[in-house]
Image: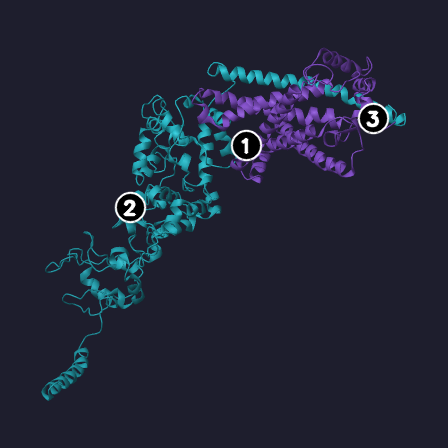
Chain colours: A cyan, B purple
């Protein structure tokens, strides 16, 4: 409990304070007009008497800019509430006195953080809106963001989105399209941010799930969002919440997004192995050694990159039958002859029927590290072929490996035994069907005539 | 007198029943694999449980085939051991003889109206051809099929390319067999206008005297002259047997006709 003396002192202090307020206000002169202020502050050389850390030395105020600004209708004292003419150092202007709602919005966002982070000073209202030349949100541009985020804005300007904007396209994404409104903006590490790893696909989908928009802008894949969300990456992100699963920007980049036809694009054909390899480092290593990887490295445009087999947005589990069967056809788009001869074998027919429990291309040749048979490391090299066959045919012998999994009986030079067998069988078929075809063709009218004759004779032969 | 005579005994008929059963089974389970690239091949294979199920069934029907083949060889061996005359030569024999070639030429001349119908004996030349076609077919298709059934076993003794040969032979010979049975055999035996829509003799074993005299006059005369005709006298086929003949016969004809139609349609596509 406070002592009676303390009580008395407290009450006295309160009474004094109440008396002091009107006493201080009463002798104050009328609040100065802006013109009064500008009498001094229009001097371009007006400086502080002593520098204050973090604030400019110049006390010049551009009256014209102020008049033209969003705050043009306000007197200086609207913000500098304690300002008198003349005056000593004034307290910092508190925008929140008027814009209280913005303070709430800013709180918790990246732009509302109170302190310097990673060497970047905490942004103030004036960082974006200006000091006296106060800009409305509508009057602000990407340059405003560029004030702090110069590198990102620079990348953006050269991106497919930035260039479309520069051409006057109003549908291309700007900073705000992906990052959200500036006051509420959250860093991409924030689970609530639209650019957070798990949220980004939905953010991109604001535009890229719209097939009409895709059509208007000649974007070839109109249903990219749906395809992605069904893919192994999309499911890992949306269902499992995996931060390590690729989202849009992992492949396409973020600010620097380029069309896949641009050689600088992360999804440009020749760059795809490196882009996928960003996560799939082991696969990239194997692929780089393969016939395909070497051909791509040499600049062969026909050699397959990751997306040729795995697709771009519909990437599926490779253990699943539909993918395993489709990739056979995919191999066949280049290796047409090999696919044709494969389809002549039991292996090829079973897979054609939609079943996978037989050898498929990759079971013998490998997948990422496909090497030519002449390479001693190849799964189909003469020294390794028996082991490859024995993956399924456990008791296979060296003689067993003399089977040709890609035989063409029509090729007399490479497969003479098969050629002559095939020719003999064909001759047998043509001979038999030819002879009996003729036999039947002649017998049919005669037999018909015979039957009619019997009927005329009343059943007698 | 007008009655029926036995043309085929029960053993013949049971064995031919096994041929029908296994042949249709082999065709229905084998063709979807051969025609895996066609829509109906995929459909039929899936309808039957997929290539591994059809493969299992195909081997079952193959066993039935090997079984009737062995039973027939046993039958022939018994005839030989009993010193039955005429197994390898003569009018009862299946062995092609000079008169078969002559009758083939005569028959072709008859087709175009250049002569009378040859007087066929017990086995006409096309019937002998069908008989030997089964012999040839079972050996060739069965042999190549065994190679493909047990590849690692046979690869202990034979080079691997033998399986490439086996694939070609098994597939083409099967096409020949299926194509022949479902067109030429069906026409010769069942679908030609004099027999249309089917000849039930393979099920009933009995042939009417009129038809006997029309189709196999030389045999009829031979038996009659030898006084042995009445040894083959038969009661008319019972109604249940005729009905059975129709059900099995028409079903088999239908399966065969559908399959050959699909094969031809695929070939023409």
Q: Which element carries disc 3, helix, strand or loop?
A: helix
Residue A413 position, x and y percent, is: 47, 14
Tell me the quarter of the image containing the N terminus of chain A: bottom left
Tell me how far mark 3 sits from mark 2, CA to CA. 102 Å
Q: Residue B167: x and y, percent?
A: 52, 24
Q: Residue furthest front?
A: B82
Q: Which residue is mark 1?
A: B59
**The C terminus of chain A sits in image quarter:** top right
Mark 3 on the same chain as mark 1 = yes
> Between tags 3 and 1, which lies in front?
3
Mark 3–mark 1 Cα distance, whole angstroms, equals 41 Å
> Which numbered marker is on residue A152?
2
Disc 1 packing (10 Å; few <14; some 14–19; many ≥20): some
Q: Position of residue A160 (x, y in %)?
A: 37, 41
Residue at 36% over, 38% down:
A267
Find residue B125 and report its image quarter: top right
Relative to residue A154, is residue A78 depicted above or below?
below
Mark carried by residue B209: 3
Residue at 75%, 32% (x, y): give it: B204
State the image quarter where residue A231 is shown. top left
Q: Are marks 2 and 1 on the same chain?
A: no
Disc 3 with disc 2 on a shared chain: no
């Amino acid at each position: 409990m406070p002592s009676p003396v303390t009580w008395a002192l407290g009450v006295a202090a309160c009474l004094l304070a109440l008396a002091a307020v009107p006493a201080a206000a009463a002798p104050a002169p009328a609040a100065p007009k802006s013109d009064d202020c500008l009498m001094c502050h229009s001097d371009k050389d007006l400086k502080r008497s002593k520098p204050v850390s973090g604030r400019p030395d110049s006390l010049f105020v551009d009256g014209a800019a102020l008049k033209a600004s969003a705050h043009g209708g306000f007197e200086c004292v609207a913000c500098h509430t304690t300002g008198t003419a003349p005056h000593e150092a004034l307290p910092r202007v508190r925008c929140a006195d008027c814009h209280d709602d913005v303070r709430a919005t800013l709180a918790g966002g990246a732009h509302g953080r109170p302190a310097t982070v990673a060497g970047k000073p905490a942004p103030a209202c004036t960082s974006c809106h200006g000091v006296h030349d106060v800009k409305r949100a509508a009057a602000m541009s990407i340059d405003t963001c560029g004030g702090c985020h110069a590198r990102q804005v620079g990348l953006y300007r050269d991106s497919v989105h930035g260039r479309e904007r520069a051409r006057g396209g109003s549908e291309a994404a700007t900073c705000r399209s992906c990052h959200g409104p500036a006051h509420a903006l959250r860093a991409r590490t924030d689970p609530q941010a639209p650019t957070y790893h798990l949220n980004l696909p939905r953010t991109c989908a604001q535009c890229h799930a719209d097939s009409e928009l895709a059509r208007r802008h000649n974007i070839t894949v109109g249903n990219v969002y749906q395809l992605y969300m069904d893919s192994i990456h999309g499911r890992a992100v949306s269902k499992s919440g995996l931060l390590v699963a690729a989202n849009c920007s992992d492949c396409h980049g973020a600010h620097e997004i380029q069309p896949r036809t641009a050689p600088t694009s992360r999804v440009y054909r020749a760059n795809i192995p490196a882009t996928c390899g960003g996560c799939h480092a082991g696969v990239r290593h194997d692929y780089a050694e393969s016939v395909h990887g070497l051909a791509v490295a040499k600049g062969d445009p026909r050699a397959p990159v990751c997306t040729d087999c795995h697709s771009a947005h519909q990437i599926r589990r490779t253990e699943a039958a539909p993918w395993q069967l489709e990739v056979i056809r995919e191999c066949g788009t280049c290796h047409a002859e090999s696919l044709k001869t494969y389809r002549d074998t039991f292996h090829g027919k079973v897979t054609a029927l939609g079943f996978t429990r037989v050898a498929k291309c990759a079971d013998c040749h490998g997948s990422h590290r496909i090497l030519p048979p002449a390479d001693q490391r190849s799964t189909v090299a003469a020294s390794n072929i028996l082991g490859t066959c024995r993956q399924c045919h456990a008791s296979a012998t060296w003689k067993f490996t003399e089977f040709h999994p890609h035989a063409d009986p029509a090729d007399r030079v490479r497969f003479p035994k098969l050629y002559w067998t095939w020719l003999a069988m064909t001759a047998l078929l043509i001979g038999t069907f030819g002879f009996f075809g003729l036999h039947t063709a002649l017998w049919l009218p005669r037999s018909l005539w015979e039957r009619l004759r019997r009927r005329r004779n009343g059943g007698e032969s | 007198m007008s009655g029926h005579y036995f043309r085929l005994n029960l053993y013949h008929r049971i064995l031919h029943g096994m041929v029908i059963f296994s042949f249709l089974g082999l065709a229905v389970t084998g063709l979807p694999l051969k025609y895996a690239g066609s829509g109906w091949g995929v459909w039929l294979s899936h309808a039957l449980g997929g290539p591994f199920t059809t493969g299992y069934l195909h081997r079952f029907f193959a066993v039935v085939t090997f079984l009737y083949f062995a039973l027939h060889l046993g039958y022939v061996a018994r005839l030989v051991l009993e010193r039955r005359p005429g197994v390898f030569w003569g009018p009862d024999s299946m062995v092609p003889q000079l008169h078969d070639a002559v009758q083939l030429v005569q028959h072709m001349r008859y087709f175009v109206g250049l002569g009378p119908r040859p007087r066929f004996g017990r086995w006409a030349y096309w019937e002998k051809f069908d008989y030997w076609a089964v012999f040839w077919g079972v050996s060739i298709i069965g042999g190549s099929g065994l190679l493909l059934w047990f590849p690692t076993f046979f690869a202990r003794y034979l080079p691997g390319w033998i399986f490439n040969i086996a694939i070609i032979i098994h597939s083409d010979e099967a096409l020949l067999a299926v194509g022949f049975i479902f067109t030429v055999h069906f026409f010769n035996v069942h679908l030609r206008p004099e027999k249309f829509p089917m000849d039930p003799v393979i099920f009933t074993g009995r042939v009417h005297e009129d038809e006997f005299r029309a189709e196999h006059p030389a045999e009829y005369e031979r038996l009659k002259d030898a006084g042995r005709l009445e040894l083959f006298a038969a009661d008319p086929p019972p109604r249940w047997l005729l009905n059975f003949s129709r059900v099995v016969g028409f079903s088999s004809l239908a399966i065969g006709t559908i399959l050959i139609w699909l094969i031809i349609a695929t070939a023409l596509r």
